[in-house]
Image: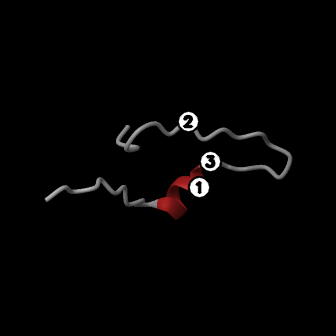
Amino acid sequence: MTETFQHYTVMLKETVDGLNIKPDGVYVDCTLGGAGH
């Protein structure tokens, strides 16, 4: 049996709130691989 890795986001709201996102800002998601780091 082969298991597929699945990443589950935790603390999404807290993380997004902490980014202080601005409407005219530029943001890049640099998630790699299984998003473990």
Residue bearing mark 3: 19
The amino acid at mark 3 is: Leu
Depth check, front residue: 7 or 15: 7
What colour scheme does the image use?
secondary structure
> Residue under circle 1?
16
The residue drawn where x is 35% and y is 42% is 36
CA–CA distance between discs 1 and 2?
A: 15 Å
Image point (50%, 39%), residue name: 31
- Please tell me whether mark 2 sits on a helix, a strand or a loop: loop
Assess disc 3: are there few (<14), some (14-19) or many (≥20) residues with their C-alpha within 10 Å of its C-alpha. few
Real-space Cα separation, disc 2 to disc 3, in angstroms: 15 Å
What mark, if any, has residue 36 been given in the picture? none
State how far apart marks 3 and 1 are (Cα). 5 Å
Q: Are marks 3 and 1 in contact (CB under 8 Å)?
A: yes
Where is residue 10 shown, x and y percent of the image? Answer: 40, 60
Q: Is residue 33 left or right of residue 26?
A: left
Q: Residue at x 19, y 55 (%)?
A: 2
Please, which residue is most extreme toward the bottom here? Answer: 13
Residue 30: which numbered mark, if any? Answer: 2
**Amino acid type of the residue that numbered disc 1 sits on in the rendered structure:** Val
Q: Is residue 26 above or below residue 17?
A: above
From the top left corner, tell me how far across and down residue 37 is, in percent: 38, 37
Identify residue type, mark 2: Cys
Asked if disc 2 and disc 3 are in contact, CB closer than 8 Å, the reply is no
Q: Examine the image and state in which quarter residue 17 appears.
A: bottom right
Of the 4 image quadrants, the one containing the N terminus is bottom left
In percent of the image, x 56 and y 36: which residue is there? Answer: 30
Q: Position of residue 14 (x, y in %)?
A: 51, 59
Name the secondary structure under disc 1.
Answer: helix
